[in-house]
Image: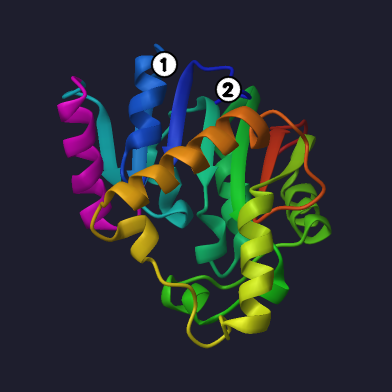
Amino acid sequence: MRYSRGGNVLDAGCGSGLLSLRLLRAGNEVTSVDAEEPMVGFTRTTLLNGGFADTTVRQLTIERIDELGSQKFDEIFCCDVIEHIEDDCLAMRQLRAMLKPGGQLILTVPAHQFLFNERDRRMGHYRRYGRKALVKVFEQAGFKIRAVRWWNISGFLLNVIGSRFVKVKTKGFSEGFRYGKRTWLSRCGHWLLGRWFHLFENHVPVPVGLTLIVVADRGHGDL
């Protein structure tokens, strides 16, 4: 959100709808799309509970994003989506085509191909990204990159350690901490992580991380 300019915003791959809700509360006009029907329903419920019943939420893949018609956007968020798409460069061109002149894309992806494991396969990932590989995709799609940064150094270190000692390549980490029954211990852990991200990771550039964040302008030239 710190990179957001606002305006008419597309949340491409809206998931649970929490980002869409935050964008709406910031005063933006928001269109939310997701490839999975359950996530579309989840987002509608999230927005309805947040007081935004009439927001546009549609089931669409990035490859079919042009079905939104002639509508163009000031800004697109695409968070942890293109790793699910086989032809990521085509998907990026599709997103660029939906931006107004001067519009921007804010995108996140899971980083480091050497961490690719069975959990990635279960989640439908085709790849993870290195910095150079991701920049190349942006450039091939015609974007002008403004910022690239790493995020979640703590998660990166845990995954590197796990890949050496927990055989994460075959089993992956347990998701119990994130999605299991909430206990006082898990609540304390979530609170501590929240403080860590809010006070450090979100403000201090780190040399490596589990996620790559890119902010890019639409750039010039025909699509």
Instruction: Report the front residue among 15 and 30.
Output: 15
Segment colored magenta? 34-51
The overriding secondary structure of the stretch rendered in magenta is helix
**Color encoding of the figure:** rainbow
Query: In the image, is 123 to the left or to the right of 138?
Result: left
Q: Which mark is residue 4?
A: 2
Where is residue 129? Give x, y as percent. Answer: 70, 62
Q: Residue at x 50, y 54 (%)?
A: 81
Amino acid type of the residue tagged 2 in the rendering: Ser
Q: Residue at x 75, y 43 (%)?
A: 142
Work out whether mark 1 precedes mark 2 in sequence or the reverse, and give the earlier one: 2
Question: Can see residue 38?
Answer: yes
Which quadrant of the view contains residue 67? top left
Query: In the image, is 69 to the left or to the right of 109?
Result: left
State whether residue 128 is above or below residue 5: below
Query: In the image, is 131 to the left or to the right of 89?
Result: right
Amino acid type of the residue tagged 1 in the rendering: Asn
Circles 1 and 2, Cβ within 8 Å, touching? The answer is: yes
Where is residue 223? Give x, y as percent. Answer: 67, 42
Residue bearing the label numbered 1: 28
Q: Residue at x 35, y 20 (%)?
A: 24
Q: Quadrant of the N terminus?
A: top right
Q: Dot 1, crowdedness within 10 Å: few (<14), some or many (≥20)?
A: some
| Real-space CA distance between mark 1 and mark 2, rounded to the nearest whole angstrom | 10 Å
* Callout 1: SS: loop
Where is residue 213? Give x, y as percent. Answer: 67, 43
